[in-house]
Image (spheres, helix red, strand yellow):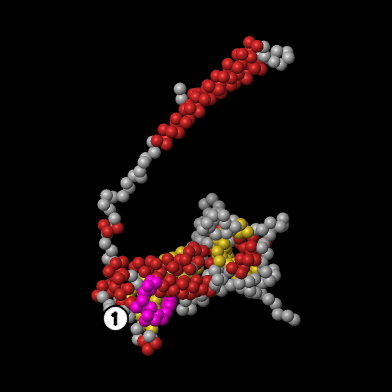
Amino acid sequence: MTILELREKRAKAWEAAKAFLDSHRNEKGVLSAEDDAAYTRMEQDITDLGKEIARLERQEALDAELSKPTAAPLTGKPLGGADQDEPKTGRASKAYKEAMLTALRTNFRQVSNVLQEGIDSGGGYLVPEEYDSRLIDGLTEENIMRRLGHRITTSGEHKINIAATKPAAAWIDEGGALTFGDATFAQISLDAHKLHVAVKVTEELLYDNAFGLENYIIAQFAKALGNAEEDAFLNGDGSGKPLGLLAATGGAQTAVTTAGASIAADEVIDLVYALKRPYRKSAAFLTNDQTLAVLRKLKDNNGQYLWQPSYQAGEPDRLFGYAIHTSPYFPTITAGKPAIAFGDFSYYNIGDRGTRSFAELKELFAGNGMVGFVAKERVDGKLVLPEAVQLLAIKASTAAK
């Protein structure tokens, strides 16, 4: 008999015992000696069934424990390993990486022929593919706009088609003439603006690479490029640099202006619903850390904070249910300036033109016992749909009369 059958039998026996007890009490509310003996036997049967059920449960648990495998299964290929992977070629090869390190450590006096595979048309040598990937990783960690925006790798001018106006439906009478609406289209071009970072390194540092020269230089270049990019992606005027998210023309739309010199909770709510509903599905807040302190202190009519702290590692805090991000390059609470952006930031497109290059300046600082290194990239950025991001701006100050 199975455990389930025994449980059903015990349940029926218990119901029968309760019914027997209710029907055999005399006028004094007690059982006769004969009925008491019968009820005691019924209770004993229920107890015995319980013991048998517990015994079978222990047996089932022990069987499950003993049936577990004693060793992890082999999931990899026999004799497989990293050495049997497809060999990398070009700038991804180990030889190119080692040749670049040798050139760095010798002031580019020892340049291997393998580096000819990565000569930049503008001078210098292209960064090995492994370095280029690690540099992109650094930018991702430092630059909030690269995380929120949409990134495109381009080989030339990249044109994005935009539906400027959409056709509208119209009612007509039976047999009436058709009305044709005009659907117009526009284009936004992502060009390429040159960004560079240069550092000076002592010759001693090149010769003594105990702490990892390549890691140091790549980390410093990543931070410098990331900071400059994020500033331009937010505040750039489009002249020799990307057109920023907050640009007066071509940037996000100002939907709410505060009534005073600070921010009220109702004004943040107005900002949320100023954004069209389809964009709110993937929307988030973007602001400055100083403004964030003001937002954290906002309360509802019951005195409860509107801020929703994150209880999961890696997840951002939330305001009105939406994630909130910060950038040190976003304006602080200043009269006449935007203080909060809310929208779907994936409509900010970032175009990376080609790959980054790395060059050594061995003559410029030779008299000082130093060597210069420069990294270059070409990048552009634009908000392709201004209505996808709405701004809350601080009221402009009025001059005293």
Q: Residue furthest top?
A: 34
* Residue 212 at x, y percent in the picture: 38, 71
- Along the horizontal axis of the image, is 248 left or right of 299? left
Residue 99 visible within the image: yes
Give the labeled residue for mark 1. 109
Residue situated in front as seen by the camera: 10 or 221? 10
**Residue 74, placed above or below residue 246:** above
**Residue in view at x 39 percent, y 72 percent:** 211
Give the extent of the magenta segment.
193-213
Query: Mark 1: which secondary structure?
Result: loop
* Residue 185 at x, y percent in the picture: 47, 66
**Residue in view at x 41 percent, y 81 percent:** 200
Choose top left, top right, bottom left or bottom right for residue 356. bottom left
The amino acid beneath tag 1 is Arg
Instruction: Count neighbours of disc 1 (C-alpha within 10 A) and say few if under 14, some if 14 to 19, many if 20 or more.
Output: few
Residue 265 visible within the image: no
Q: Residue furthest left?
A: 113
**Residue 37, placed above or below residue 333:** above
* Residue 106 at x, y percent in the picture: 31, 79
Quadrant for the C terminus, please: bottom right
Q: Is residue 148 magenta?
A: no
Choose top left, top right, bottom left or bottom right for residue 276. bottom right
Residue situated in front as seen by the camera: 174 or 260? 260
Residue situated in front as seen by the camera: 278 or 219? 219
Quadrant for the N terminus, please: top left
Q: Is residue 204 magenta?
A: yes
**Residue in view at x 27 percent, y 53 percent:** 80
- Along the horizontal axis of the image, is 345 left or right of 365? right
- Along the horizontal axis of the image, is 357 left or right of 56? left
* Residue 109 at x, y percent in the picture: 29, 81
**Residue in view at x 36 percent, y 78 percent:** 206
